[in-house]
Amino acid sequence: MEILLIMFSVMLIQFIVLLMILKKVKHQQKATQEYITNLENNITNLVESTFHTMSQQISSLKIDNYVNTANKSVNTEEHKYENEFFTQEFGHCKIVKIIDKQDNSITHVYYDENEKKSYTETFNENSLTYSAHYKDDRLNRGCEYDSKSNLLFEYFYNEIGEVIKKIEYLYAEDGTLEKTLETTY
């Protein structure tokens, strides 16, 4: 009888240990699944951020290249430079307007009192489509607008031009702001 009781106790202990192991395995599976989900979300955000950063940097480099090249080569009060891709207008040895001949967009370039680029505004068919704001001549914030000039996306950049935060603005059909979605990278 004692042997049966001991065997029963051992089996009961083994059963309890087995239940504890199963519980721990389930917890680890859940933690692993959460880790995988977070990893997938982080990779998706990184890909979106990288794509947008590269896209914005290319766009910004295009404008910056126009501005910087022209600023170094023009020494007159007012001047125009034109080629098959764009027309640049200068004022006080700085580019003040760029007309893109491919999409007919017009970008106005504004400078602060220290003659550093402070912001740009790009219009297409008289509608504001993009604005870029600079701090110490570096892109600090970019904004995309819809055809009604409603702010759609706002991007914030770090010192090396990478997107660190994106805010998406969502509107109702009547044009009123419904909500914003913020993503930090």
Image (cartoon, rainbow, N blue to C red):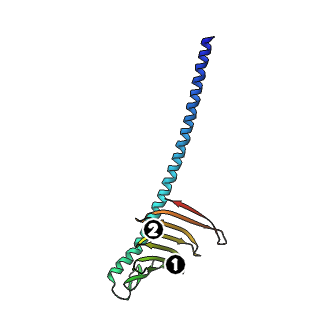
Tell whether label 1 touches label 2 (CB within 8 Å): no
Q: Residue at x 36, y 77 (%)?
A: 68
Visible residue check, residue 100: no
Work out which residue is located at the far top of the displayed protein and give it: 1
Real-space Cα separation, disc 2 to disc 1, in angstroms? 17 Å
As displayed, is residue 168 above or below residue 20?
below
As displayed, is residue 54 above or below residue 127?
above
Q: Quadrant of residue 171?
A: bottom right
Q: Quadrant of residue 93?
A: bottom left
Q: Position of residue 55 (x, y in %)?
A: 45, 66
The residue carrying pointer 1 sits among few (fewer than 14), some (14 to 19) or many (20 or more) residues within 10 Å by Cα, namely some
Q: Please give the residue where the numbered disc 2 appears in the rendered image.
A: 56
Q: Residue at x 45, y 68 (%)?
A: 56
Q: Is residue 1 left or right of residue 98?
A: right
Q: Please give the residue where the numbered disc 1 appears in the rendered image.
A: 124
Q: Position of residue 7 (x, y in %)?
A: 59, 16
Along the line of sight, which residue is nearer the eye, 48 or 15?
Answer: 15
